[in-house]
């Protein structure tokens, strides 16, 4: 089992799903990199079509996917229309049963997205050819295009900015369900983020200790846990008194 993740657009092509807060190419790269790390954590072989803000033409991009040896390609995008369209969409091949696209859409809805549709689209006058090159030109790799929402819709824009990690998890979970991979939620991330804040605030100086020991089955010393609780209480008190 291998997966390739395709952050749409990049470099000279910012993507249409942009607004005053983010550019599509940056947002989908952020989502894709998160997915990359999480699949590695889950023990799934994973690749990205781009890791940086580079320009890839459609031929180069399709070739990368086609020659990756991956089973699945997730192509990440943000939509744009007229400001009134809202919600998530997934697009799958006319040669696929649409199961994976359905799982992904259902999970995105559970994560807070408005449901639009999972659909296929063919080239005009060519009912045997998929419309999108990333689906049509990628050989045996089963590609699903994920449109997380509309950048020009205020609800979608807010959701994408605030909950893009939940959306990424929703897609990861769907891939795991589809392929029978056992899914576990992210272990390291929330703790890492919390530790960074505490280090920057000068409250702790050994983040590595906590990273190793403040986990299920770990061995955090009772007196250290007590210090953390006391500091937590102090912080709340300061906040209440308006000094913090
Ligand atoms: Zn796009």
Image (cartoon, rainbow, N blue to C red):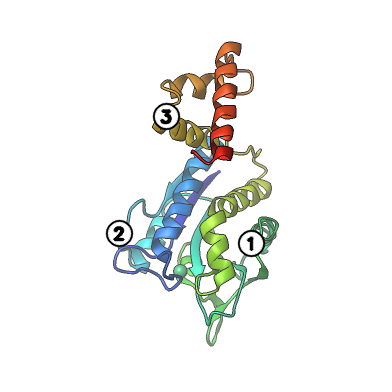
Question: Residue 13 bears which disc, if any?
Answer: none
User: In the shown orientation, is residue 152 left or right of residue 105?
Assistant: left
In space, the residues marked 3 and 1 are separated at their CA atoms by 41 Å
Q: Quadrant of the N terminus?
A: top right
Mark 3 nearby-residue class (10 Å; few <14, some 14–19, many ≥20)? few
Mark closer to the observer (3, 1): 3
Q: Is mark 3 within 8 Å of ligand 1?
A: no
Q: Residue at 58% across / 34% down in the picture? A: 236
Name the residue tied to disc 2: 54
Q: Quadrant of ligand 1?
A: bottom left
Picture layout, residue 237 above or below residue 37: above
Q: Do the numbered discs 2 and 1 sit on residues whose CB atoms are within 8 Å?
A: no
SS state under label 2 = loop
Q: How much space separates mark 3 and mark 2, taking CA atoms?
A: 34 Å
| Nearest to N terminus: mark 2 or mark 1 | 2
Task: Decide: few, some or many residues near mark 1? Use Cα within 10 Å; few <14, some 14-19, many ≥20.
Answer: many
Q: Are marks 3 and 2 in contact (CB under 8 Å)?
A: no
Q: Which residue is mark 3?
A: 199
Residue mark closest to the camera, 3 vs 2: 3
Nearer the observer, 193 or 134: 193
188 displayed left or right of 10:
right
Q: Give yes or no for contact between labels 3 and 1 (Cβ–Cβ under 8 Å).
A: no
Q: Is residue 97 above or below residue 16?
A: above
Q: Earlier in the sequence, mark 3 or mark 2?
A: 2
Which of the 4 image quadrants contains residue 21? Answer: bottom left
Residue 145 seen by the camera: no
* x 61%, y 12%: residue: 222
Q: Position of residue 74 (x, y in %)?
A: 52, 57
The yes-or-no answer for disc 2 within 8 Å of ligand 1 is no
Q: Is residue 8 visible?
A: yes
User: Left of 115 or right of it: where is 235?
Assistant: left
Q: Which residue is mark 1?
A: 101
């Amino acid at each position: 089992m291998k997966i390739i993740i395709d952050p749409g657009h990049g470099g000279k092509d910012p993507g249409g799903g942009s607004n005053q807060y983010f550019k599509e190419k940056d947002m989908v790269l952020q989502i894709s990199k998160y997915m990359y790390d999480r699949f590695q954590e889950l023990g799934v072989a994973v690749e990205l079509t781009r890791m940086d803000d580079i320009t890839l033409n459609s031929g180069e991009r399709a070739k990368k996917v086609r020659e990756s040896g991956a089973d699945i390609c997730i192509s990440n995008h943000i939509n744009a229309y007229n400001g009134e369209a809202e919600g998530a969409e997934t697009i799958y091949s006319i040669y696929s049963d649409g199961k994976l696209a359905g799982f992904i859409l259902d999970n995105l809805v559970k994560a807070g997205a408005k449901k639009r549709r999972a659909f296929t689209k063919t080239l005009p006058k060519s009912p045997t050819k998929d419309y999108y090159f990333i689906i049509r030109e990628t050989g045996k790799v089963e590609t699903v295009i994920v449109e997380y929402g509309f950048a020009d819709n205020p609800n979608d824009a807010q959701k994408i900015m605030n909950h893009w990690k939940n959306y990424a998890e929703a897609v990861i979970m769907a891939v795991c369900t589809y392929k029978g991979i056992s899914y576990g939620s992210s272990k390291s991330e929330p703790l890492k983020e919390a530790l960074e804040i505490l280090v920057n605030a000068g409250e702790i100086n050994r983040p590595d200790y906590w990273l190793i020991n403040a986990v299920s089955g770990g061995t955090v010393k009772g007196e250290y846990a007590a210090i953390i609780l006391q500091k937590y209480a102090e912080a709340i008190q300061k906040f209440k008194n308006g000094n913090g």
